[in-house]
Image (tube, rainbow, N blue to C red):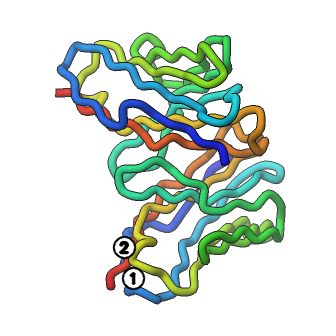
Amino acid sequence: GAVVSQHPSWVICKSGTSVKIECRSLDFQATTMFWYRQFPKQSLMLMATSNEGSKATYEQGVEKDKFLINHASLTLSTLTVTSAHPEDSSFYICSARGRGTTYNEQFFGPGTRLTVL
Amino acid sequence: GDSVTQMEGPVTLSEEAFLTINCTYTATGYPSLFWYVQYPGEGLQLLLKATKADDKGSNKGFEATYRKETTSFHLEKGSVQVSDSAVYFCALSHTGNQFYFGTGTSLTVIP
């Protein structure tokens, strides 16, 4: 089946630093990748959608200058949290769909837990 | 707009009990419906799906039937196990791009 990985699985950083999270599709070409944020005991909130080779589309209320998304290849998307602050601490999940996957499904990565001190 | 409403948890059941987690939706047209499961500290895994009315999705003993007349997609399992303890999310999508998730229902199964 379609497998999506994320790296790192968890990260702790100091306030003011930047953190990069990678999302990879392992066995299919991800033409579209999605980034979600999940707060404790809450549902997933879509942050942005990115298509390979083009700029990401951000959901309303998501700061594009703070959450930089790059989808440079068909197997890799990155989310960079710039100048992180404690309120950015959260569980970040990516998902992907693309060639070789069922048209109406997204395949989710295992998530990255970010803690900003 | 499209939305998903699921029963609030947490739900606590004894092993081998019957499970129902209610899910209703509001949507235009004919979306696909999904149940995802999230184990502690992990991402979401697709549990089952249904793409049209009256379809029944099933996997690992879980079932859900796409009921257009009641706009529902309730998750059921006849006999839960401790290993089923997780958070369950109901979701809908038309095209596979925009997913609408419910708030999740936490299930704890005790021996």
Residue at point 41% right, 18% down? A80
Say if B99 sits above or below B110 in the image: above
Say if A1 sits above or below B25 in the image: above
Determine whether, in the image, residue B109 is placed left or right of residue B68: left
Residue at point 61% right, 46% down? B100
Q: Earlier in the sequence, mark 1 or mark 2?
A: 1
Say if A54 sits above or below B13 in the image: above
Identify the mark at residue A13; answer none if there is no mark. none
Residue situated in front as seen by the camera: A67 or B48? B48
Q: Amino acid at mark 1?
A: Leu
Identify the mark at residue B13; answer none if there is no mark. 1
Say if B21 sits above or below B99 in the image: below
Give the SS element for disc 2. strand
Name the residue tied to disc 2.
B108
Locate residue A34, reporting x and y percent. Answer: 58, 31
Locate residue A14, reporting x and y percent. Answer: 18, 20
| Pointer 1 with pointer 2, Cβ within 8 A | yes
